Image (cartoon, rainbow, N blue to C red):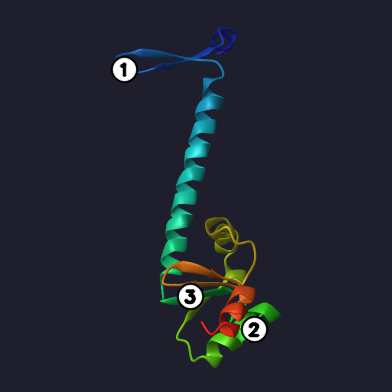
Amino acid sequence: LVAQLELEEFVIRNSTDVTAIPAGTESQSAEKEEESKKEDQSSSLNERLQQLITRHRIMLFMKGIPSAPRCGFSRQIVELLDSHNASYDAFNILEDEDVRQGLKTYSDWPTYPQLYVEGDLVGGLDIVKEMEEGGD
C-alpha cells in the first residue's frame, strides 16, 4: 500500500486487465458525479414543479392553505379568487422547502403567492389586483 501511494497512482486490478488511475483523478470523478446528481435532482424538481403547476387549470402557490392563509398577501389573493367563484387548487409552499425555493428559480419570480393559469405564470398579488381592476 505504501509503495502504491508513493507511486502517486492507484491500480485497480481486474481478473484480466490492470488499469492505472492517475493521482487526483478520483476527486475529479467525484466532482463530476456530484454535478451529475445535482443536474438529475434539478431536472427531477423541474418535472415535479411542472406537474404541480399543471395539476389544475388555475393553480395557486401560497403560504398556508385557502381556508387558513399564513400571510396577508396569500389571504388577499384567496379572497380575490373566491370573490370571482374561481375553481382553483392551491399548494402550501411552507410545507415543502424544495418546491418553495425551486419555484422561485423555475418561474423567475421571487415572491409568493404565485398564480398560474393553464400552466403559465400570471404573477403575484399585485398583478392579479391589476387584472381585476382592469376587468380581466
Amino acid type of disc 2? Answer: Arg
Marker disc for residue 124? none
Say what secondary structure mark 3 lies in: strand
Q: Tell me if residue 101 comes above or below residue 136 in the rendering.
A: above
Q: Are marks 1 and 2 in contact (CB under 8 Å)?
A: no
Dot 3 alpha-carbon crowd within 10 angstroms: few under 14, some 14 to 19, many 20 or more: many
Residue at the spot of label 3:
59
> How far is mark 1 from mark 2, CA to CA?
67 Å
Q: Give the number of the disc on residue 15.
A: 1
Which comes sooner in the sequence, label 1 or label 2? 1
The residue at the point 64 percent across, 83 percent down is: 75
Disc 1: CA contacts within 10 A as few (<14), some (14-19) or many (>=20):
few
- Left or right of 1: which side holds 20? left
Q: Find numbered disc 2 in the image and state the secondary structure of the residue it sits on.
A: helix
Q: Spatial distance from mark 3 to mark 1, Cα to Cα?
A: 58 Å
Residue of label 2: 75
